[in-house]
Image (cartoon, grey):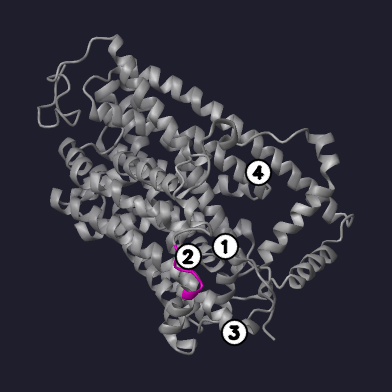
Amino acid sequence: MVEDPTLAVIRFADLAVLILYLLITFGVGLWAGMRTTTTEGYFVAGRGMSGWAVGISILGTAISSITFLAYPGSAYDGNFSRIVPGLAFPVGALMGIYIFVPFYRQTGYISAYTYFERRFGLWARVYVCLLFTLAQFWRMGLILYLLSMAMNQMSPQMNLQVSIFWIGVFVTAYTVLGGIEAVIWTDVFQTIVLILGGLAIVVAVFITVDGGAWTVLSMGYENGKFSFFGKDVASAFDLSFSTDTLIMLFIIGSIGSVCEFALDQTHIQRYIAAESDKAARRAVWIGAGGCVPVWLLFMFVGTCLWVFYQMFPDRLPREMLADEVFPFYILHELPTGLGGLVIAGVLAAAMSSISSCISAVATVTTEDIYKRILLPGCKDSHYLKIGKTISALSGASMILIALWLTTMRQETILEMCFVIGAMLGGAMGGMFLVGFFTTRANNYGLVAGVILSTIVTCGMTYIEAKAMMWESRVSWMIEEVTDSGEIDTKALRTEISAEAQAQGKTLKLADVLKIEKKRIRASLEDRIQAKLGPQPPHLGEAIGFHPFMMGVLSNLVAFIVGYFFSFLRPPKSLKELGGLTWKTRHLPHFQA
């Protein structure tokens, strides 16, 4: 009988591979650090990076640990539908190649947010910089927390807090040493590792399963594992924005990718770091062109695992949730040493995203706040020290946020992700697009757009957060009665499974748990109403827009209001807008 997955221990050969990965990563960072002696080198790699390296770096940053772990679980449990928003990624990439790359390369801005001051004034630059920095602190802390949770799941003997501390220190160290050049070259190595990790799973399943690749492909096809739609295909093309339909997800993905390639400092920094305009465009082609195939690879990993355990069901010691299967397979089925490569891939996927965020925060904080406002006119060596100090402080903040998250319930973290993500979006995309694509927009209109967009965002956040908090409290009540023994969950699950078998059905564990929660909730209905009151509506029920649409709506309000309110003040001349809009991009920059 296979041992329980909670007793898994990383094997010696796996550990050796993992240590080798860490040593190479740190060595690359140290090598880059020895070459970096100026802020130009630290923030934009001396503007001399090869296009292929920058492109692989963009690819690595886009593939987070969520891709590596969540996509296989999603495909194992269902099909390829989760990847739909990612299919819109090339939409933003095309605009990046033909619009944003030439623009930023022409301006030469090290920070993307220098543009906002030139277009609307210093307040806009500081506002966007602060929003971006706070959002990156939260993102880094969350990624580090999720990565450490994944590592803890694969080896429960590892202390979660200790994992957070040492992983955070390691990523921060090589980023502080080498700046963006270290980030790009470690991204290249880490991207190769994570892709090899995914391919290792696929090859291992092909070799193990009778019939190899043909068996995996045929079983997957016959059971709808390669479908991009849910169970109800017709509903996927519903034009409603209140549910997560295929059309809605594609719209969100398209707008999100456009804003990402237009405004995300982690991308802008790479545009400038490339050795030429041609190299920068090639980098975006490589990064965007590689993302979808890699995402599909990790969805296919989930399908491979599903086929494997359909063929060898006795290899699972018990029924598992979909997200538990991948870590179990790594430690119990892969040959020794190969498991270490896949675990290194998990680390690589997260580290590439974290190091990019640290470098981006150091760049914008140094350029937009310290150098522009706090202490301008110093020597370049002083700003280099400040950049490295801010990188170190960013890493420390990331570790503290991740450690703080370990003290919270999972439901609370989900609520915080929603609220913080919504509030720190700040309609930055709408601000940039109205300034870049129109010549009418001005400072007065943008202020009005930002204020009204913030009000709308706060209102939508309040509606959805209230509904989420109500459901979290219900979950806590259910947890209390099950933990106290008031309700026998084991007997209830047996009853649910027996009822399904009587109807000729076989339920997955996730389905059993869902029905169990629904029945317990029904039995507590009177208690819930007395304590919490009626259930508040979610955003889709209240205003007809799914919470995923919040970012789109916030940016739309900022754009529309910013544009029309600008008519209340005289427009700037095309000469004054030289080099600041799409229409005037070829005109010389205006010097007041």
In primary-sequence order, the first of circles 2 and 4 is 2
Q: Which residue is mark 2?
A: 346
Binning the other alpha carbons within 10 Å of mark 1 as few (below 14), some (14 to 19) or many (20 upward) gives many
Q: Which residue is mark 3?
A: 312
Which one is nearer the viewer's eye here, 289 or 76? 76
Residue 540 located left or right of residue 368: right
In primary-sequence order, the first of circles 4 and 3 is 3
Residue 467 located left or right of residue 489: left
Residue 436 lies, with reference to residue 17, above or below; the image says above
Q: What residue sits 61% from the left and 67% below the top? A: 324
Q: Which residue is mark 4?
A: 412
Circle 3: residue type: Phe
Q: Which residue is mark 1?
A: 150
Q: Are marks 1 and 2 in contact (CB under 8 Å)?
A: yes
Q: CA distance from mark 1 to mark 4?
A: 19 Å
In primary-sequence order, the first of circles 1 and 2 is 1
Binning the other alpha carbons within 10 Å of mark 3 as few (below 14), some (14 to 19) or many (20 upward) gives few
Query: What label does residue 335 carry, if any?
Result: none
Circle 1: residue type: Ala
Helix, strand or loop under label 2: helix
* Quadrant location, the C terminus: top left
